[in-house]
């Protein structure tokens, strides 16, 4: 038996469209991270960028379970006493609600050069409008994959 290793000529990328409305954030992020890495393919090779291009729409309507809407994101400005924080609810209601989904997906990928390249194949939009219609993405219905993927508030 020989182990299959993909070469750049073997890689076939597709465009995937995912509607995040009513989907639990962590479950959505794990599915998207798996698609970005290419682990859903039988020809998966860990050191190659063979994942699909993913478009996520309705990121502002994603659901969070428990008290996760009140959890904080912290960052430091670099100045003394410069620690800042914002809750996930404040971010979702603010100007850039797609950042919650982007951060969840980024944190499910390994921290290396390859994952930064794979993350560039992700597009997240807060509303239903996206400028990627020319790529003819195929729709991936995350809600019907598992009944636990959705949550009614």
Image: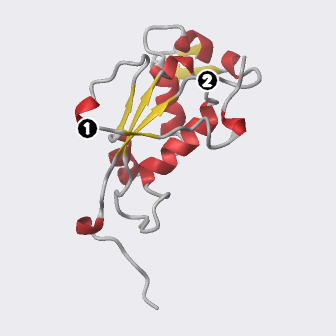
| Residue at 48%, 16% in the rendered image | 97
Q: Coloured how?
A: secondary structure
Furthest residue in direction right, as rendered: 66
Circle 1 residue: 135
Q: In what quadrant of the picture does the C terminus appear?
A: top right
Q: Is residue 119 visible?
A: yes
Q: Secondary structure at mark 2?
A: loop
Say whether residue 141 is left or right of residue 6.
right
Residue 105's place in the image compared with 85, above or below, is below
| Residue at 29%, 38% in the rendered image | 136
| Residue at 63%, 19% in the rendered image | 72
First in residue order: circle 2 vs circle 1 = 2
Where residue 102 appears, as percent x and y from the top left, is 46, 30
Say whether residue 7 is left or right of residue 24.
left
Q: CA distance from mark 2 to mark 1?
A: 25 Å
Q: Quadrant of residue 61?
A: top right
Where residue 29 appears, as percent x and y from the top left, is 55, 38
Q: Nearer the viewer, residue 31 or 103?
A: 31
Circle 2 residue: 22
């Amino acid at each position: 038996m020989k182990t299959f290793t993909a070469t750049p000529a073997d890689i076939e990328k597709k465009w995937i469209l995912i509607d995040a409305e009513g989907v639990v954030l962590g479950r959505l992020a794990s599915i998207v991270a798996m698609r970005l890495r290419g682990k859903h393919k039988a020809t998966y090779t860990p050191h190659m960028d063979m994942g699909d291009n993913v478009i996520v729409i309705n990121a502002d309507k994603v659901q969070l379970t428990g008290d996760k809407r009140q959890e904080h994101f912290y960052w430091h400005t670099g100045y003394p006493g410069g620690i800042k924080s914002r809750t996930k609810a404040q971010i979702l209601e603010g100007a850039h609600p797609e950042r919650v989904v982007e951060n969840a997906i980024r944190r499910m990928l390994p921290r290396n050069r390859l994952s930064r390249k794979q993350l560039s194949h992700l597009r997240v939009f807060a509303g239903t409008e996206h400028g990627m219609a020319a790529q003819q993405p195929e729709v991936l219905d995350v809600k019907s994959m598992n009944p636990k993927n959705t949550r009614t508030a």
